[in-house]
Image (cartoon, rainbow, N blue to C red):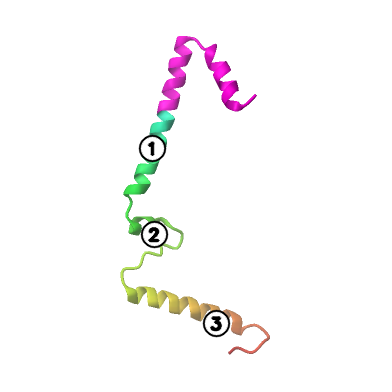
Amino acid sequence: MTTKERLQAEIEHLSEDDMADLLRIIQNRTQTGQNQQLSLMTKSITDVLAETPGHLAFQSAEEVDAYLRDERDAWEHQFCRLPAPCT
């Protein structure tokens, strides 16, 4: 028996009050999910980036270049500490 079939069998035995409660629960869950999706759709990309770990929301191309340059330097310095020579 599938989950859908089990649910249909259970629902058939519910009282009117229990059925009304079930419908309210389903409606609330559906509205909550729709509200979450709507809030995600209305956020700007800068809002989304501001909420990410590291807050990588840049204001200009120069900030991006500086960030990438710092990251490259950090990687190069990390690898230069290895026994192999740096290139």
Q: Secondary structure at mark 2?
A: helix
Image x and y of residue 87, in percent: 58, 90
Magenta part of the chain? 1-27
Q: Which callout, 1 or 2, points at the residue further toward the start of the chain?
A: 1
Cα separation between marks 3 and 1? 46 Å
Return the residue at label 3.
76
Cα separation between marks 1 and 2? 22 Å
Image x and y of residue 84, in percent: 67, 87
Please identify, in this view, whether the residue under mark 1 or under mark 2 is nearer the observer. 1
Q: Give, as a three-letter code, the residue at label 1.
A: Gln
Q: Secondary structure at mark 1?
A: helix
Q: Give, as a three-letter code, the residue at label 3.
A: Glu
Q: Secondary structure at mark 3?
A: helix
Q: Is residue 84 above or below residue 34?
A: below
Q: Is 79 inside the magenta-drawn segment?
A: no
Magenta residues: mostly which secondary structure? helix
Instruction: Tell me the crowding category of disc 3: few under 14, some 14 to 19, or many 20 or more residues within 10 angstroms, Cα based.
Output: few
Instruction: Tell me the crowding category of disc 1: few under 14, some 14 to 19, or many 20 or more residues within 10 angstroms, Cα based.
Output: few
Number of labelled discs?
A: 3
Q: Give, as a three-letter code, the residue at label 2.
A: Leu
Cα separation between marks 2 and 3? 26 Å
At x 43%, y 58%, the residue is 52
At x 45%, y 11%, the residue is 17
Return the residue at label 1.
34
Question: Farthest residue toward the top?
Answer: 15
Image x and y of residue 8, in percent: 55, 19
Q: Is residue 40 above or below residue 13?
A: below
Q: Which callout, 2 or 3, points at the residue further toward the start of the chain?
A: 2
Return the residue at label 2.
49
